[in-house]
Image (cartoon, rainbow, N blue to C red):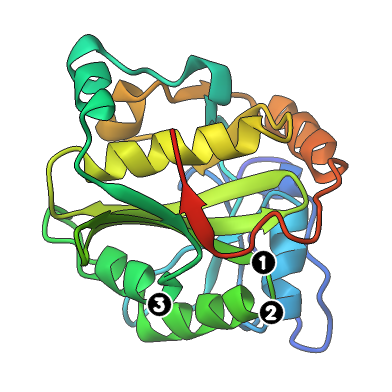
Amino acid sequence: MSKAGQTLSLLDNSSLAFPCVSNALSDPNGLLAIGGDLKPARIIESYRQGIFPWFGKNEPILWWSPNPRAIIPCNKIRINRTLQKFVKKSPYRITLNTAFTEVIEQCADAPFRKEETWILPDMISAYADLHKRGYAHSIEIWQKEELVGGLYGIAINGYFSGESMFYSANNASKIALIALTRLLESIDVTFIDCQLTNPFLESMGCCEITREQFLQLKDNAMKTAIEPDFWLPRELSL
């Protein structure tokens, strides 16, 4: 039974409207709505409001806005001494938006993930479409010609919401995360939306803030103008 003010909404396929995030359930934390579709306009509208899709196999599409919300402040990303030494001598090459499909497919099949993946074929197709439209982006980590790590997420102007990451070589996902913070800092964006925290993200400086604090940060970031060539495929450096 939902608490007062908390209701699970059924989305109308004929409308892109989402319920107010304050209606999200506290148990499970942040579940706001069910149904709808994964068309680009709906997904982008959800991120504009601080909502994201997340569901498992044989489940309907579920939409979430958790409270608290996990973020990494770009200026507080945690790089310990061992990682600092690795970064200085890193054997990796870092690129932006050069292998989006490969990254999301690797994230879906990450061997370290204990739970079943939520990056299902429909989600891969939807986010690949968003990539083509300039909303979904990836950072790739290469060892010679082999893709050994990366991450992807959604960007609306200066607001970046991270979706997933993977690694198959030492520190590769950490390098990708550091590269993303440096990229965002270059346009004065102060945080990465991590949605939900986990031990790995916490080790990299992830913290939790209230939904209200997050929404204010998100709204400010979305006002940050981005140059047309900002997300063009290229090599990145740390």
Q: Residues within 10 Å of mark 2 (few under 14, many from 20)?
A: some
Q: Secondary structure at mark 2?
A: helix
Give the number of the mark in front: 3 or 2: 3
Q: Residues within 10 Å of mark 1 (few under 14, many from 20)?
A: some
Where is residue 38 drawn, in percent x and y?
Answer: 60, 81
Residue furthest top as drawn:
81
Task: Name the residue type under label 3.
Answer: Thr
Please report contact status of discs 3 and 2: CB closer than 8 Å, yes or no. no
In the picture shown, does residue 48 fall above or below 77?
below
The part of the image, by quadrant, that contains residue 82 is top left
State the residue in front, 185 or 118. Answer: 185
Q: Kindly report the distance in space between the C-alpha atoms of the residues bearing marks 1 and 3.
A: 14 Å
Q: Kindly report the distance in space between the C-alpha atoms of the residues bearing marks 1 and 2.
A: 9 Å
Q: Quadrant of the C terminus?
A: top left
- State left or right for residue 164 relative to residue 109: right
Task: Name the residue type under label 2.
Answer: Pro
Task: Name the residue type under label 1.
Answer: Tyr
Residue at image mark 3: 101
Q: Which mark is residue 40?
A: 2
Give the number of the mark in front: 1 or 2: 1
Camera sees residue 179:
yes
Residue at image mark 1: 135
Q: Residue, x 53% and y 31% (percent of image)? A: 71
- State left or right for residue 72 relative to residue 201: right
Q: Which mark is residue 165?
A: none
Q: Secondary structure at mark 1?
A: loop
The part of the image, by quadrant, that contains residue 221 is top right
Please report contact status of discs 1 and 2: CB closer than 8 Å, yes or no. yes
The part of the image, by quadrant, that contains residue 14 is bottom right
- State left or right for residue 25 relative to residue 159: left
